[in-house]
Image (tube, rainbow, N blue to C red):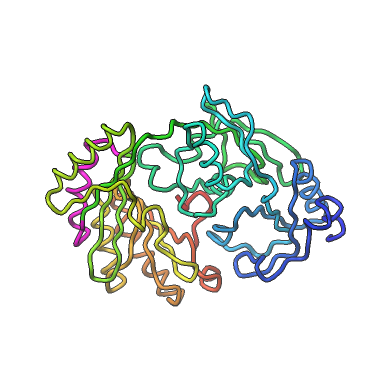
């Protein structure tokens, strides 16, 4: 197999997997780093002919999320599938290779006064990794998910066939693609001239409802909450974007509505757009209406027996809660089921997005596209 991969990708771009090449706690068999769509197709063709398994990997920031995989024979590293072309500034579209880091894409677009209105919290996320699970950050409140800005995608299916999808109504069915996405045509937005954040302390989740309501009236780009479990209380932060005068005016109006404790700044809070969990934690995704979010957080704390760190979109009611990765599987399952029972009456959901491998194999994990 290694010889075949070397023939396709070159001697420096195919190798036996190392200790860093793990998925769900298990080392993969081989790593291939193809540079073209044709070489991706050739790798997948060989994998299919030999009855093996393959998995694409961008930066690897989310490769362990969700239902654990029984094993991966070939990791297809997309690092060489990088770059942007057909950037139509006037039409606000661009075609991007999916191994391109999102940050690199945004930097290139900014030179033309544009951006993709997506800010995945995985700092090393590639375009392909972001689209594979529809990873959303704070900007989802105003702009929706990254998938909503995809006109079409090019991909190679599991059998090695090259295909393209623009889906229905101009939107490709990303969740249905079983293979390796190689490129995407994206719709872009103008880069905002100014950004202002308004922050205020939130001693308890109970205060969120009124504060969020005041912010929603001013049409912000994002409404995020950070509620640590350190007894110091949390923070609610709201982002306004646009022309300088408009952003400053909206921020000032919200600060006045919130009162003397509110602060306006051109700099994001240090926690903004970052996940609250680490690799050895359990990440529990809660999705409910913004109105019912405080009740869901109190229910979670009551079930756990103390405050639980939470961060995410208070405006959408979609947040990540952090649980210890040392919990026994039965205890973790009981916590999740208890919270689900509370959320069920409020049309909400709870799912375990990430957990240490040994725990992930013992509990019910979120499926792909349940992450966000």
Question: Does the magenta segment cover residue 321?
Answer: no
**Residue positioned 76% across, 58% down in the render:** 52
- Seen from the viewer's position, the closer of residues 33 and 56 is 33
What is the total number of numbered labels drawn onto the structure image? 0
- Seen from the viewer's position, the closer of residues 347 and 353 is 353
Residue 352, compared with residue 371, is above or below; it is below
Residue 320, compared with residue 105, is above or below; it is below
Q: Residue furthest left?
A: 260
Horizontal side, residue 62 vs residue 274: left or right? right
- Seen from the viewer's position, the closer of residues 342 and 156 is 156
Residue 194: x and y, percent? 34, 37
Residue 28 quadrant: bottom right
Residue 243: x and y, percent? 32, 31
What's the magenta bit mostly, secondary-structure-wise? helix
Q: Residue furthest top?
A: 90
Residue 304: x and y, percent? 31, 71
- Find the magenta span and give its range: 201-220
**Residue positioned 47% across, 59% down in the render:** 353
**Residue positioned 30% across, 65% down in the render:** 228
The quadrant of the image that shows the N terminus is: bottom right
**Residue positioned 83% across, 61% down in the render:** 2
Residue 110: x and y, percent? 49, 37
Horizontal side, residue 146 vs residue 44: left or right? left
Residue 89, compared with residue 75, is above or below; it is above
- Seen from the viewer's position, the closer of residues 281 and 108 is 108
Question: Does the magenta segment cover residue 209?
Answer: yes
């Amino acid at each position: 197999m290694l010889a075949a991969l070397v023939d396709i990708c070159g001697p420096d771009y195919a190798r036996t997997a190392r200790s860093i090449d793990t998925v769900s706690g298990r080392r993969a068999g081989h790593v291939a780093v193809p540079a073209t769509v044709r070489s991706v197709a050739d790798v997948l063709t060989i994998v299919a002919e030999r009855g093996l398994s393959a998995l694409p990997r961008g930066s690897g920031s989310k490769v362990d999320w969700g239902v654990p995989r029984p094993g991966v024979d070939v990791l297809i590293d997309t690092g060489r599938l990088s770059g942007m072309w057909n950037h139509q500034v006037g039409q606000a579209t661009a075609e991007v290779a999916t191994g391109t880091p999102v940050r690199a894409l945004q930097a290139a677009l900014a030179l033309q006064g544009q951006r993709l209105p997506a800010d995945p919290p995985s700092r090393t996320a590639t375009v392909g990794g972001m689209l594979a699970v529809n990873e959303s950050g704070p900007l989802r409140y105003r702009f929706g998910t990254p998938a909503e800005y995809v006109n079409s995608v090019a991909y190679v299916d599991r059998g090695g066939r090259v295909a393209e999808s623009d889906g229905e109504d101009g939107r490709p069915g990303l969740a249905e693609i079983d293979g390796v996405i190689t490129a995407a045509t994206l719709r872009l937005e103008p880069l905002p001239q100014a950004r202002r954040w308004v922050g205020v302390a939130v001693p308890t989740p109970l205060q969120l409802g009124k504060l969020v309501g005041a912010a929603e009236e001013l049409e912000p780009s994002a409404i995020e909450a950070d509620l640590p479990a350190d007894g110091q209380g949390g923070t609610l932060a709201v982002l306004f974007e646009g022309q300088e005068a408009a952003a400053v005016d909206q921020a000032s109006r919200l600060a006045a509505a919130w009162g003397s404790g509110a602060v306006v700044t051109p700099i994001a809070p240090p926690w903004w757009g970052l996940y609250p969990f680490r690799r050895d934690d359990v990440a529990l995704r809660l999705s409910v209406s913004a109105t019912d979010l405080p009740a869901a957080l109190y229910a979670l704390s009551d079930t756990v027996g103390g405050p639980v760190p939470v961060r995410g979109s208070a405006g959408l009611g979609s947040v990540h809660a952090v649980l210890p990765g040392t919990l026994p599987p039965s205890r973790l399952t009981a916590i999740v089921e208890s919270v689900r029972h509370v959320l069920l009456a409020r049309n909400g959901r709870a799912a375990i997005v990430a957990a240490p491998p040994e725990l992930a194999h013992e509990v019910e994990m979120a499926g792909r596209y349940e992450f966000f």
